[in-house]
Image (cartoon, rainbow, N blue to C red):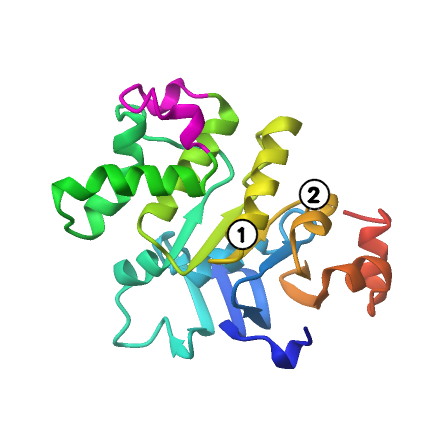
Amino acid sequence: MTSDEREAKLEIDTLSAWYEDNRALDGVTMTIAAREVTAIIGPSGCGKSTLIRCINRMHELVPKARMHGRVRLDGVDVYGAASDPAALRRRIGMVFQKPNPFPMMSVRDNVLSGLRLTRSIPANGLDEVVERALTQAALWDEVKDRLDRPGTSLSGGQQQRLCIARALAIEPEVLLMDEPCSALDPIATTRIEDLLHTLRTRYTIVIVTHNMQQAARVSQRTAFLLGGQLIELSETDALFTSPTDKRTEDYITGKFG
């Protein structure tokens, strides 16, 4: 499928972002296609995490942080006057680098925590929500007999999938993932990567990763950031085999980074 044939889910237009006087992003413009995995790679400090935090307006929660530019979800500016950040974050879920289940909550309550904050559902529908979200996160069979145990009693990989289930419970349209496998062992990482292949048929996924092999395995398109700028965005296979920019080639061949 060519870029022209893709359905655009997110459009980022000349996006710049700062932390006080430190510029983290510099005029990034890119389109993220619906129901695909887009990987964002680049060296530490290049603006990868800042970019996805601008997408769901988490960047503005940082003291003295600011941004300029446009982010459109289905053609609507998420920073427009009519945009509600809380409603936006129901449509754009996020999974962080370190698994962070709520320590005083059971597996069941961890899954439902975001849903209870965002909408009212009938009590007799809670079990169905829990099973659906955990099944989508490929965790149901492993925890269905332990739903009342603390979420923190699970292994690291299970905790990360629990956090994915928590994000999926509110039925978002977009799932942002900020290095979700960096704290996991290879077996748990494989489970998450396999999960991404399944989830992309229903969700638009953006994954920040420092692992280029992971980007090559899970994504359909890859963006390379350097110094806060978008250097290249293309089909993943093309970016890793025949990049158009020398800086991309130097990075993926290990000359820096």
Residue 191 lies, in percent from the top left, at 58, 34
Kind of residue indicated by mark 2: Asn
Q: Secondary structure at mark 2?
A: loop
Q: Nearer the viewer, residue 62 or 2?
A: 2
Whether tag 1 and tag 2 are in contact, CB under 8 A, the answer is no
Residue 75 lies, in percent from the top left, at 42, 79
Give the residue at mark 2: 211
Please give left or right for residue 209 compared with residue 64 in the image.
right
Residue 41 lies, in percent from the top left, at 67, 53
Instruction: Tell me the number on the disc at residue 49.
Output: 1
Residue drawn at (58%, 36%), measured in percent from left and top?
Answer: 181
Q: In the picture, residue 60 is in which quadrant?
A: bottom left
Kind of residue indicated by mark 1: Ser
- Quadrant of the snapshot with the N terminus: bottom right
Q: Evaluate whether residue 11 shows in this view.
A: no
Q: Residues within 10 Å of mark 2 (few under 14, many from 20)?
A: some
* Farthest residue, direction bottom: 4
Q: Residues within 10 Å of mark 1 (few under 14, many from 20)?
A: many
Residue 159 lies, in percent from the top left, at 44, 29
Instruction: Tell me the number on the disc at residue 35.
Output: none
Alpha-carbon span between mark 1 and mark 2: 14 Å
Q: Secondary structure at mark 1?
A: helix
Tell how many labels: 2
Residue drawn at (53%, 46%), measured in percent from left and top?
Answer: 178
Residue interval drawn in magenta: 139-154
Name the N-terminal-most of marks 1 and 2.
1
Q: Nearer the viewer, residue 2 or 56?
A: 2
Front tag of 1 and 2: 2
Q: Nearer the viewer, residue 44 or 153?
A: 153
235 part of magenta stretch: no
Q: In the picture, residue 187 is in which quadrant?
A: top right
Q: Nearer the viewer, residue 133 or 17?
A: 133
